Image (cartoon, rainbow, N blue to C red):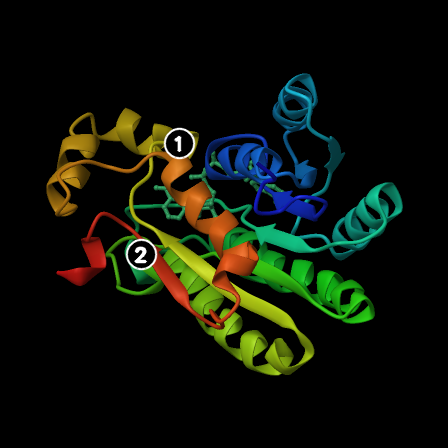
């Protein structure tokens, strides 16, 4: 049976590990050729190789999403490689400093978190959208977070960046829906990926604390977010526009 995205071209940022790697594999399973991108070259090459080894099409390009020229080059090399861009998953992100109150939050960490998590998503859309307009359509999914929908103490830059992604997704969705580009976001709860490592190192009971906050009684797995992302990019979600979909085991329903 043909996959949901047979013959489509998908771009994934932050594709070396975690949610981005899982999404790259699900895009490929559904028949898309995948442009994998990250600043982590070894991990990104490994994701692309895994796809090729199982008979799919994938290519890796290094790009820092907070740098305009990197993003510009990434999109043009992706289009050069596969001819078009149907789906984009703007997912690269960092946690930054956690546990610092707003008045003590380090300037450098603030700029880095906003630069990657928020400006990075905008820069990606800025360069993906012209290609999609040229083709007459496409689908974009941005990675926000439960912390784009509710607050959390000690993580002001991260919370602000993810609330920014939620707003940016809504604004852009309204601008481009009439032209056939559907833009949505996913808002993951706590998901078992390398982004959690520093938290678990600092607070060994972190995972049990987070488990207790998710009504489903566990934290999530990268695949569970990846399936939602690929569905949002597919024609099965053809009437879904401008939504911020929680994939969070009930966290934001409380
Ligand atoms: N894991 C969670 O609990 C969770 C929850 C909500 C939202 N998120 C979001 O999901 C996204 C993916 O995170 P993850 O959990 O898979 O973590 P991760 O650390 O495994 O993946 C993030 C990836 O982004 C890459 N990256 C970092 N800075 C980059 C840059 N400047 N340019 C390009 N790539 C860069 C990293 O190298 C890494 O491969 C992030 O936006 C994160 O904020 C994660």
Residue to which mark 2 is pinned: 146
Residue 135 in view (yes/no): yes
Q: Find out if the beta carbon at label 1 lies less than 8 Å from the nearest ligand 1 atom.
A: yes
Give the residue at the far front of this rendering.
Answer: 1
Residue toward you, 109 or 244: 244
Q: Secondary structure at mark 2?
A: helix
* Coordinates of residue 224 in the picture (x, y in percent): 37, 40
Residue 95 in view (yes/no): no
Q: Residues within 10 Å of mark 2 (few under 14, many from 20)?
A: many
Disc count in the image? 2
**Disc ID at residue 193:** 1
Q: Secondary structure at mark 1?
A: loop
Q: Find out if the beta carbon at label 2 lies less than 8 Å from the nearest ligand 1 atom.
A: yes
Check the picture and name the quadrant holding the C terminus. Answer: bottom left
* Coordinates of residue 6 in the picture (x, y in percent): 66, 44
Corner quadrant of residue 136:
bottom right
Residue at the (58%, 57%) spot, across then down: 115
Check the picture and name the quadrant holding the N terminus. Answer: top right
Residue toward you, 140 or 38: 140
* Coordinates of residue 151 in the picture (x, y in percent): 26, 62
């Amino acid at each position: 049976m043909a996959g949901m995205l047979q013959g489509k071209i998908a771009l994934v940022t932050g594709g070396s590990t975690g949610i981005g790697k899982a999404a790259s594999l699900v895009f490929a399973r559904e028949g898309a050729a995948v442009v994998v991108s990250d600043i982590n070259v070894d991990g990104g090459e490994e994701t692309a190789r895994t796809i090729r080894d199982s008979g799919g099409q994938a290519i890796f390009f290094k790009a820092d999403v907070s740098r305009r020229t990197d993003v510009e080059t990434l999109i043009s090399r992706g289009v050069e490689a596969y001819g078009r861009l149907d789906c984009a998953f703007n997912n690269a992100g960092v946690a930054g400093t956690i546990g610092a109150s707003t008045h003590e939050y380090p300037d450098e960490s603030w700029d880095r978190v906003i630069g990657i998590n928020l400006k990075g998503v905008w820069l990606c859309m800025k360069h993906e959208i012209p290609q999609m307009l040229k083709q007459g359509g496409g689908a974009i999914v941005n990675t926000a977070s439960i912390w784009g929908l509710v607050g959390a103490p000690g993580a002001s830059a991260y919370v602000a960046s993810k609330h920014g992604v939620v707003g940016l997704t809504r604004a852009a969705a309204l601008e481009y829906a009439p032209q056939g580009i559907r833009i949505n976001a996913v808002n993951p709860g706590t998901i078992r990926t390398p982004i959690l490592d520093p938290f678990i190192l600092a607070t060994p009971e972190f995972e049990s604390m987070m488990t207790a906050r998710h009504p489903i009684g566990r934290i999530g797995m990268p695949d569970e977010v990846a399936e939602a992302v690929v569905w949002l990019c597919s024609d099965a979600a053809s009437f879904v526009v401008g939504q911020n979909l929680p994939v969070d085991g009930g966290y934001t329903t409380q």
